[in-house]
Each structure stands twice: as structure tokens, then as C-alpha cells.
Amino acid sequence: MNPPVVIQQQFVRLLAIAMANNNLYSPQHPQVIQQRNAARALHETLLGERHAVRLMVVNQQLVIDDIPQNSGLHQQRLVKAMTRCGVSHIELKRHLEDAELGSLIAWLAAGDTFGLPVSPHIRLGCVTVCYHQAGEVEPSPAVAAQQQENLRQLQQNYSADELERFAEIYSAAAKQRQLNMAGLAQIVSCFIDAMHYHADPLLALAPLRKIDDYTFVHSTNVCLLNIAQARSLGIEGAALHDIGLAALLHDVGKLFVSSEILNKPDKLDDEEWKQMQQHPQRGAIFLLKQSGVPRLSVITAFEHHLGFDQRGYPTLPAPWQQSLSSQLTAISDVFDALRTSRAYRQALEVEKIREIFRDMAGKQLHPGLTENFLTLLDEPGSDMQTPSQG
């Protein structure tokens, strides 16, 4: 790949991640500042001998300095942000300052046509493109074929082997109350590798719908969804692995809840609901007794039903700061539960889930992370529109 294109992709990635983090933290948060500064450094590299770097949206495709960009996660996020703000042309001139770029990132993240950043080194505008023929442009046969090939490779590469291994580990844990942490860690690493290899992070969920056992498939789906969310926020390395592993183990406490309660088609009575509400504590205690379990997995198992407003369970003393991993897991947990058919409820359509999520934002779910997740659902190739069968 041409080196300037690689740098352009890195630049867009940093802008998109900084926008996502700007919605979660203050503009002066160290993570926002770090990504903003890194993006400005790449801007200097892209300039070369020119006086400005130009970003344009043409037919919903991002173009940087006349080079069309691939339609990946971060590129589409930037396109949508520019579209929401009513701008299709951004020119970043030489001598761009940190504060100027930070103001632009905050404005794009807000998605508001007001509060337009005034800067001597940033120029905003619109580009109009005329077409000879109207109508929606369908993906080319080559693109459609590649998407199908990606899905086939995912199914062959790890869905059967890794899910079978996870099923065995989960079954052994239920019988022997002992976890194979090395095996679980390898499974999470496999999922992370798959998402690094494929541009569309949520495509990896498709193969899981062919497995019938809800208990461990739900945990696997939540793991994959957590990894996708975390990567969109710029989390990589050991932290990404720990967040994935925590998701894989978030519901381990349900090993101590009877199957009659877990699969009851009717509403739980007071005693049954009390037992169900104990699974976070039971899971955390169980994980504390296991060798090699990261602390984040214990915390996530304990907190994932706490809720952003802390009105969930268990009841904890104030103030209590719910971890980022627990907040990501709560979103993934609710989404997969709603999109999966159960004995007591049919799977919901994604548009209905969107309505539920927007109502839950700021209550049970973190508002910024919820908006980030809904953005992920819109990304090309995210196979999330078809409900699962559980």
C-alpha cells in the first residue's frame, strides 16, 4: 500500500477515535488530548510541501487530497459526522494548532450545525456533485463477492473450533466449578485477531447464529460486541484482551442459578427474581477463587447489571464508579438479549432495539457509549439486522 494512503488511514482513525472519546470524556481528558496530538502530528506529515490537507465527502465516500478512502469503520464515522454537521469539505492548513484541531473534533463529535469552529487554519465548506442518473448505488459485484468471502472465512476459521472449545470449557466449569483460563484467553485472542483482520468489526457475529445453546453463545456474542466497542474507542493490546475476557465471563454466576429459572417462559416470582439478582455476586465470588482471572473480569461480573444510574443490582453504596468494561458489557448484554429469540419472547427488530436503547441511555446505559454503539450498528458490513435464534 502507498505510504501516504497508510498515513491518511491512520489520520482518519485518530480523528474518529478522538471524536468517540470526546463524547465520553471532557475535551481535556488525557486520552482525547493524546489522540488529538497524534492526529496533528500526522497532519504535519501529510502536508509535505503543500499548504493544506483537504478532506471531502463525495457520494458518501471520504476523499483525502484527491485519494478515495476505503469504506471502513473510521472513515464512515467521519463521513457521518461531517454530514450531520452540514459540511462536506474540510481544509486543514499548515500551522494548525492543537486547540484548533480540538475544537474541530469536539464540533464534529457533537454533530451540530451550530457552534461552527472559527479558526485561521481550518476552512469548512460544501461540495456539490451532479449525477447523470439518480438512484441508490448498489455495491459492485466484486465488493459483494468479497463480503461473502470474508463471512465464509470467518465461519471456517474459528466459529466451529473456538465455540466448541468454549462450550467444553463452560460445561466443565458447570460440573467441576473450575475454569480453564488458558483456553479462554486463547479464544479471546482468536476473536481479537479475527477483528483485526476484517475491516467490518461486527461481521464476526454472523457465524454464532448457527449454534443453539444460548448460555455460552450469549457470552461469546457479548465478548465480540465488547471487542468491537473497545476497538472503536482506540483500546488495543492487553486492555482490549481483558475487556473481551471480562465479557466472556460476565454471566458465569448463572452457573449457580437453576435452569428452571433461567429458561422459565413466564414472569419470575419474587423468590426466583431474588435468586436471579444474586448471579453477579455469585459470579464475582466464583472468579475470585479461580487462578489467573484478571481483576477486571471479577469487577465486570459484579457490576454489569448495576446500571449507569446505579438503579440496577446489586445495591451498592454511593458514590460508586462503574468501570468502563462493565458499561460496555451492559450495552452488549442488553443488545444481544433483545436480538435473540427466547422461549418467553421473540427477537426484536433492530429499529425497535434502537428505540429501547435511546430510552435507556442515561438511565441503565451510559449515554455516550450507547450512541457510539448505535453508530457501530450503522457501519457497512455489520451483520446486525437479522435477529438471532437462541
Image (cartoon, grey):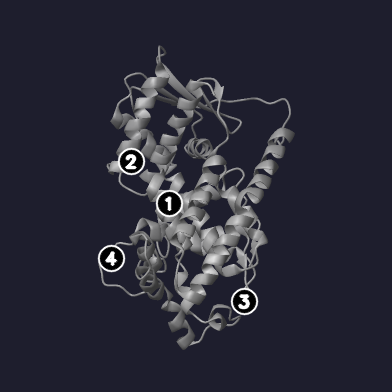
* Helix, strand or loop under label 4: loop
Residue highlighted by disc 1: 241
Disc 4 to disc 3, C-alpha distance: 34 Å
Disc 2 to disc 4, C-alpha distance: 24 Å
- Mark 2 vs mark 4: which is more N-terminal? 2
Label 1 with label 4: CB-CB less than 8 Å: no
Residue highlighted by disc 3: 344
| Residue 148 visible in the current orientation | yes
Q: Amino acid at mark 2?
A: Val
Closer to the observer: label 3 or label 1? Answer: 1
Disc 1 to disc 4, C-alpha distance: 25 Å
Q: Residue furthest top?
A: 49
Query: With respect to residue 289, does 124 lie above or below?
Result: above
Query: With respect to residue 10, does 208 lie above or below?
Result: below
Residue 323, image x, y percentages? 34, 59
Q: Amino acid at mark 4?
A: Trp
Residue 280, image x, y percentages? 40, 72
User: Residue, x 46% and y 60% (percent of image)?
Assistant: 247
Label 4 with label 3: CB-CB less than 8 Å: no
* Helix, strand or loop under label 3: loop
Q: Amino acid at mark 3?
A: Tyr
Disc 3 to disc 1, C-alpha distance: 34 Å
Q: Quadrant of the N terminus?
A: top right
Q: Relative to the observer, which residue lies in front, 250 or 25? A: 250
Residue highlighted by disc 4: 320
